[in-house]
Image: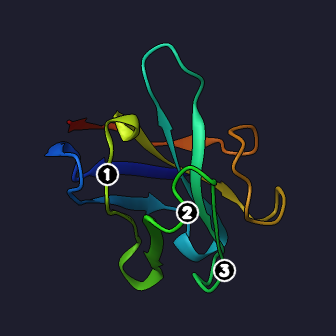
């Protein structure tokens, strides 16, 4: 079992930056794949970034590639999402998610393998 708690959301103007954090507890953090998802009102949940257990490999959706950076610090049980050059289209609730590496390899941007989810943090970008 892994418990995830996100923080760092807020309101920002277009072009600004935010850094989201995901604090984990429970099972060893370096045994889980981690990703960030977002869900805007009326839209499906979208995977935006994923990271390997070591942190050396990352994956991004086309919508955020070059603007967002996912990272993790296993010694601190912490994952982060640095979001730069934000646009109003980035407005959503952002979720941290994880699943054990025994399920499948890391790098999934679809919600289905993720069985641990945080409560979400709101990000609002105004024009």
Residue 13, quarter of picture: top left
Q: Are marks 1 and 3 in contact (CB under 8 Å)?
A: no
Q: For marks 1 and 3, give the CA distance.
A: 23 Å
Q: In the rendered structure, which disc, 3 or 2, sits on the residue that comes first in sequence?
A: 3
Q: For marks 3 and 2, give the CA distance.
A: 14 Å
Task: Give residue 47's position: percent from left, percent from top.
Answer: 60, 45
Q: In the rendered structure, which disc, 1 or 3, sits on the residue that comes first in sequence?
A: 3
| Camera-nearest label, 1 or 3 | 1
Q: Are marks 1 and 2 in contact (CB under 8 Å)?
A: no
Numbered circle sitting on residue 65: 2
- List the residue tagged with mark 1: 86
Q: For marks 1 and 2, give the CA distance.
A: 12 Å
- Residue 56 appears in view: yes
Q: In terms of depth relative to the viewer, which is nearer, 7 or 126? A: 126
Q: Residue at x 69, y 50 (%)?
A: 109
Identify the element where label 2 is drawn: loop
Q: Residue at x 21, y 53 (%)?
A: 8
Q: In terms of depth relative to the viewer, which is nearer, 80 or 5? A: 80
| Camera-nearest label, 3 or 2 | 2
Whether residue 124 sits left or right of residue 11 in the image: it is right
- List the residue tagged with mark 3: 57
Identify the element where label 3 is drawn: loop
Instruction: Give the total number of marks visible in the rendering.
Output: 3
Q: In the rendered structure, which disc, 1 or 2, sits on the residue that comes first in sequence?
A: 2
């Amino acid at each position: 079992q892994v418990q995830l708690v996100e923080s760092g959301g807020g309101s920002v103007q277009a072009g600004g930056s935010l850094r989201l954090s995901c604090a984990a507890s429970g099972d060893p953090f370096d045994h889980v794949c981690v990703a960030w998802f977002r869900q805007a009102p009326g839209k499906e949940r979208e995977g935006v970034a994923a990271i390997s257990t070591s942190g050396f490999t990352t994956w991004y959706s086309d919508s955020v590639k070059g603007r967002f950076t996912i990272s993790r610090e296993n010694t601190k049980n912490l994952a982060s999402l640095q979001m730069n050059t934000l646009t109003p289209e980035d407005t959503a609730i952002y979720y941290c998610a994880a699943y054990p590496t025994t399920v499948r390899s890391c790098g999934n941007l679809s919600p289905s393998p993720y069985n641990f989810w945080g409560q979400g943090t709101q990000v609002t970008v105004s024009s």
